[in-house]
Amino acid sequence: MDKFHIRGGVALKGRVSISGAKNSALPCMAAAILTPETITLHNIPYVRDIITMRRLLEDIGAHVLTPELRTHKISAANVELMQAPYELVKTMRASVLALGPLLARFGKARVSLPGGCAIGARPIDLHLASFSKMGADVFLEAGDVVARAPRDRLVGAEIQFEKISVTGTENVMMAATLARGKTVIHNAAREPEVRDLGELLNKMGARVRGAGTPKIEIEGVEALGGAQHTIIPDRIETGTFIVAGAITKGELEIKDCNPEHCNRIIGKLRDAGVEIEEVNQSTLRVSYGKPIRAADLKTEEYPGFATDMQAQYMTLMTQADGQSEITETIFENRFMHASELQRMGARIQISHDKAVVEGPTNLIGARVQASDLRASASLVLAGLIAEGETIIDRVYHIDRGYEKIETKLKAVGANIERVRESVTSPLSASQEVRG
Ligand code: EPU
């Protein structure tokens, strides 16, 4: 397993380019299952989860060509297997995104039931209840969810999500595109990634209205066709680099991003004293002006502050003057980074869904362990300002969702090295992640 060795203390300076959003690319790749024609996706990030989704598509019989590193041409003309196996689902929960499209196009699907994961229980009951409402017979068999549509076609339905779910909304949206009649999703997730998927589906000939709002209406059509689409920039990578610039007291120009998608993140970081300038529609400049201020934070569904930026914000708050309270409302176990930050000297107290951070503290380099994707990012940020050397273990977590983070950080001055371990440790065989 690879490790990062980071020597802290360098103010980051220069330009960073933001990659495509992993959480938009994943459902868009799954959407290719809906049609026998080719879907061409541009700006796909080069990260581990994308490779896993590609494997899933190839496993079921689809062909994936990459004429360029960030372009995928996916043809699901010959799907032979309507199934996502445990080996894939256990490493990536987003594999459940295959369920909706398989069920919609072939009237049947089998996907291994994802268990809990490092950040919480994360059930998929809302996805399954929606498919049942659309007429599918959904049952559990040998650890797999099996779903079958009557006469191989789902029927449109009124879906009321009792809780907002991002992949739940995406799965139902995809399933509804080929259903008989109209589906309305109430209390839908409003994330930019949901809207991006809606755009792709409409380019394929679907009739989706309201993606990105709480009410999405989908008129089912008989068949979908090929399309080309460019994935939106990754708003969480953008936020992570804003924090990197601010926390190191540097000056970064963050290009190829979409500031509009980062409104709440930018607003909250400005509350904390970070100077962020919108240079143009795709560029932000972050610089150090005044000392970081403590500011409370509550994670929320979009357009609220993203849970995927909570860990990075916590690292920033270790440098703030005063006490800040961070409330995590989306996942029940998403403070795993706190204990590692404590090992570096941070003063953090956790109680249920709240973390109280007392700043500022001088972080000291230590050997720490990444527990999930965003937790790893918070440790990298901590390493960038810590005194001495920080060694981060299990960086495969960060490789799942950040494209070449160490290369990007090095280019703006960070002292970070990836150290490859040649001897396979017994642990590397079980990189079960389920993020
Ligand atoms: N939930 C249920 N039942 C369901 C579905 C969700 O109770 O059927 C609960 C979850 O347990 C959680 C809440 O609802 O408490 C929200 O979960 P959601 O379904 O929205 O999460 P997700 O779709 O599994 C996506 C992202 C996550 C991100 C969350 C929240 C993708 C592939 N993943 O997960 O991204 O944290 O939305 O914004 O889009 C990451 O990139 O690091 C990551 C974990």
Image: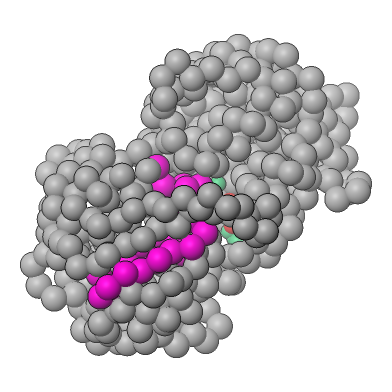
Q: Residue at x 72, y 27 (%)?
A: 59
Q: Is residue 7 above or below residue 282?
A: below
Q: Residue at x 53, y 49 (%)?
A: 422
* Quarter of the rendered image showing ligand 1: bottom right
Could you tell me residue 99's position as x and y percent? Answer: 72, 37
Q: Is residue 218 magenta?
A: no
Tell which of 315 and 193 is nearer to you: 315
Could you tell me residue 77's position as x and y percent? Answer: 68, 13
Question: In the picture provided, is 247 more to the left or to the right than 312?
Answer: left
Could you tell me residue 131's position as x and y percent? Answer: 76, 41
Q: Residue at x 30, y 56 (%)?
A: 416
Identify the magenta region.
Answer: 375-403
Using the rendered image of the protein, determine whether residue 318 is visible from the camera's viewpoint.
Answer: no
Q: Residue at x 32, y 87 (%)?
A: 358
Q: Is residue 402 magenta?
A: yes
In the image, farthest residue toward the front: 423
Q: Is residue 155 above or below residue 226?
A: below
The C terminus - image quarter: bottom right
The N terminus - image quarter: bottom right
Task: Determine which quarter of the picture holds residue 107.
Answer: top right
Could you tell me residue 346's position as x and y percent? Answer: 35, 82
